[in-house]
Amino acid sequence: MDNQKPSVCVLDASTYVGFWILKGLLSRGYTVHAAIQKNVAGETEIVKKIREMKKVEERLLVFTVDVLDYHSIIVALKGCCALFCCLDDSDGYGYDDDTTVDLEVRGAINVVEACAQTHGMQKIVFNSSLTAAVWRENICSEEEVDERSWSDQAYCRKLKLWYALAKTLTEQAAWALAMDRMLNMVSINAGIVVGPSVAQHNPCSTMSYLKAEAAQMYENGVLAFVDVNFLAEVHIRAFESQSTCGRYFCFNKIVNTEEEAVKLVRSLSPLISLPPK
């Protein structure tokens, strides 16, 4: 065991991205606090894997938290110098209205405030989405979409793009509070996440992302995907590098040909079925 590595927290470690970040941190010798949100549907396969890992991995501590319960977050963060924040739909029902959006925003505010009250907190690495940047009325007329771009809230509500709205408002709330509390924060805005068993372990988030007018994203050149191993690596490097700041768009490939679209569909099977040729 490497005693030089500090303790860090992954919340929610039971999300698909959170789990791969957890694995990456452990492989590098970090002590990890795996904060798992309470799930009304019961333990998922990822949660079961984490509890099995705990039996053999002394550098893994497991906490059950409720992001709407500020004090439970404080307990999980105690002794940690960094938080990898991977908020997502925790109950498996997907993003389908303003209520779902509001719960994630309130959770993000509680998490960032808990970081502000945690002694020795050096950095928040906030997992976000490209959908927090690409949606507005005249996106086709814009020359570029970059880290300065934000999705338009009214446009998202108009088209009922609840996932995009949730990621936009949640990230904006996190940034506003982090700056107010003078916390060092970095956001990683990911494309569609692909990887081992993604259809099994990340169905609601994947489908919520694609419901956000995937065809229109394809036409506008902003339909992008990222391998979960690469995404986890980016999160960890964002923490380890002192020079990182602001927002980073993260993807392996932009889908702009039929061949690439077919490859993406196949990687997400059976969530999405391949259409007739």
Image (cartoon, rainbow, N blue to C red):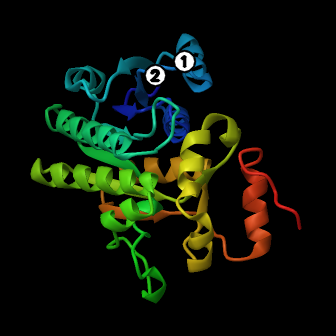
Q: Is residue 5 visible?
A: no
Q: Can you tell which quarter of the image residue 189 is in?
A: bottom left
Q: Name above or below for residue 77 compared with residue 100.
A: above
Q: Name above or below for residue 130 compared with residue 105.
A: below
* Residue drawn at the location 52% of the way across and 32% of the way down: 92
Question: x, y percentage for residue 255?
Answer: 66, 71
Q: Residue at label 1?
A: 43
Residue positioned most to the right: 277
* Residue drawn at the location 70% of the way across and 38% of the way down: 197
* Residue drawn at the location 46% of the way across and 45% of the way down: 96
Q: Which amino acid does label 1 sit on?
A: Glu
Question: x, y percentage for residue 57?
Answer: 53, 17
Q: How crowded is mark 1: few (under 14 residues within 10 Å), some or many (20 or more)?
A: few
Say what secondary structure mark 2 lies in: loop
Query: Residue 39: which numbered mark, if any?
Result: 2
Q: Can you tell which quarter of the image residue 102 is in?
A: top left
Question: x, y percentage for residue 211?
Answer: 56, 56
* Residue drawn at the location 71% of the way across and 45% of the way down: 271
